[in-house]
Image (cartoon, helix red, strand yellow):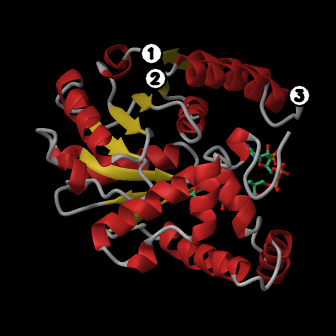
């Protein structure tokens, strides 16, 4: 199956950039969010991002105009999803909310539509049985910032058909990504498992008073060649997300080692969630 129309559900941290990737690749995109503030922010991003790319000489005026015309913002899930070939869900990391959304999408979308989740850690088999098309429900996991990061993880759980995995891999390639295929479901997929190891260690070193946030970040950048240190990255991806991911994992495993670290809990409670709120481990204008 060839994907032509994509609906991105959720215009937040990840969704607005996934929608833009798809629009730049020539897909017809509808991006939906039921929060008017988030939707307004996403529309404003689409306008300014494309203009800035043209000014920077990274995009031609023609390509930018085409991309802007390819993307339509709405607050109606029916309008967004009723004729989509592929839906990419990028909403809050709460299983019950995702299951309800997928059950709704199953009713709204045509029979051929693939329903993918951008969840950082919820495997699609936990959502697929809320629909009548489990073979067409899979993980398609992008990385932040989605417009820059080339990796997309496509996870082919046992319930996912070969056709679905192949179609989603091809759609990611068309978006200019380098997708990787996971042949089985596993918590955290590939990248977040690797990331988590560094992050946990960084938090432990901070809590032990071994070094400052700045110096641990500098060490990761200059000693390992990471593009940004673990704390800057936590600010970018969201401390609220790290908190929810940790809590969910702990709820499932019952293992205290899986609980979010005291520093993450403290920042979460204080509302210091990172770049999006102007303060996390660092302060932002
Ligand atoms: N949105 C869109 N584009 C952005 C951007 C953003 N937020 N931030 C930077 N860019 C673009 C710039 O426009 C620039 O593009 P150009 O070279 O084509 O003009 C390019 O990225 C480089 O930007 P800068 O020179 O301003 O800054 P850096 O070179 O420091 O790059 C970075 C910034 C791309 C964020 C880089 O530091 C990086 O790669 N960091 C690591 C990010 C990472 O590890 N992401 C994965 C997180 S884990 C995750 O997402 C999983 C999830 O489940 C939580």
Q: Mark 1 points at which residue?
A: 75
Name the secondary structure under disc 2. strand
Q: In which quarter of the image is the N terminus?
A: top left
Which x, y percent locates residue 142?
Answer: 52, 51
Res 184 seen here: no
Q: Mark 3 points at which residue?
A: 55
Q: Earlier in the sequence, mark 1 or mark 3?
A: 3
For the residue carrying disc 2, how many other residues have a C-alpha within 10 Å: few (<14), some (14-19), or many (20+)?
many
Q: Residue 32 carries which label?
A: 2
Q: Which mark is residue 100?
A: none
Q: Residue at x 41, y 51 (%)?
A: 119
Q: Residue at x 53, y 52 (%)?
A: 241
Q: Earlier in the sequence, mark 2 or mark 3?
A: 2
Q: Which of marks 1 and 2 is nearer the N terminus?
A: 2
Asked if disc 1 and disc 3 are in contact, CB closer than 8 Å, the reply is no
Whole-Å distance between the Cαs marked 1 and 3? 30 Å
Which x, y percent locates residue 273?
Answer: 64, 49
Whole-Å distance between the Cαs marked 1 and 2? 5 Å
Which x, y percent locates residue 144?
Answer: 62, 51
In this view, the residue in front, 100 or 168, is: 100
In this view, the residue in front, 272 or 238, is: 272
In this view, the residue in front, 46 or 267, is: 267
For the residue carrying disc 3, how many other residues have a C-alpha within 10 Å: few (<14), some (14-19), or many (20+)?
few
Q: In this view, does 105 lie to the left or right of 227?
A: left
Q: Residue at x 83, y 29 (%)?
A: 52
Name the secondary structure under disc 3. helix
Asked if disc 1 and disc 2 are in contact, CB closer than 8 Å, the reply is yes
């Amino acid at each position: 199956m060839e994907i032509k129309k994509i609906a991105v559900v959720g215009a937040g941290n990840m969704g607005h950039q996934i929608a833009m990737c798809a629009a730049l690749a020539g897909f017809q995109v509808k991006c939906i969010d039921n929060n008017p503030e988030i939707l307004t922010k996403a529309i404003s991003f689409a306008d300014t991002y494309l203009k800035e790319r043209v000014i920077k000489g990274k995009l031609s005026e023609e390509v930018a105009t085409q991309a802007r015309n390819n993307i339509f913002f709405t607050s109606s899930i029916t309008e967004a999803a009723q004729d989509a070939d592929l839906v990419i869900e990028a909403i809050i990391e709460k299983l019950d909310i995702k299951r309800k959304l997928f059950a709704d999408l199953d009713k709204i979308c045509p029979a051929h539509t693939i329903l993918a989740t951008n969840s950082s850690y919820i495997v699609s088999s936990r959502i697929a049985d809320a629909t009548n098309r489990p073979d067409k429900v899979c993980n398609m996991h992008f990385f932040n910032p989605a417009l820059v990061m080339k990796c997309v993880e496509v996870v082919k759980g046992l319930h996912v058909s070969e056709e679905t995995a192949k179609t989603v891999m091809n759609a990611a390639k068309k978006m200019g990504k380098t997708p990787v295929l996971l042949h089985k479901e596993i918590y955290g997929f590939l990248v977040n498992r690797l990331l988590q190891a560094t992050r946990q260690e960084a938090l432990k070193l901070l809590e032990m008073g071994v070094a400052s946030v700045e110096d641990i970040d500098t060490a990761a950048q200059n000693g390992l060649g990471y593009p940004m240190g673990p704390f800057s990255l936590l600010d970018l991806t969201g401390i609220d997300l790290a908190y929810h991911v940790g809590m969910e994992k702990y709820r499932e495993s019952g293992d205290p080692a899986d609980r979010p670290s005291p520093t993450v809990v403290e920042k979460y409670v204080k509302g210091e969630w990172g770049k999006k709120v102007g303060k996390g481990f660092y302060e932002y204008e």
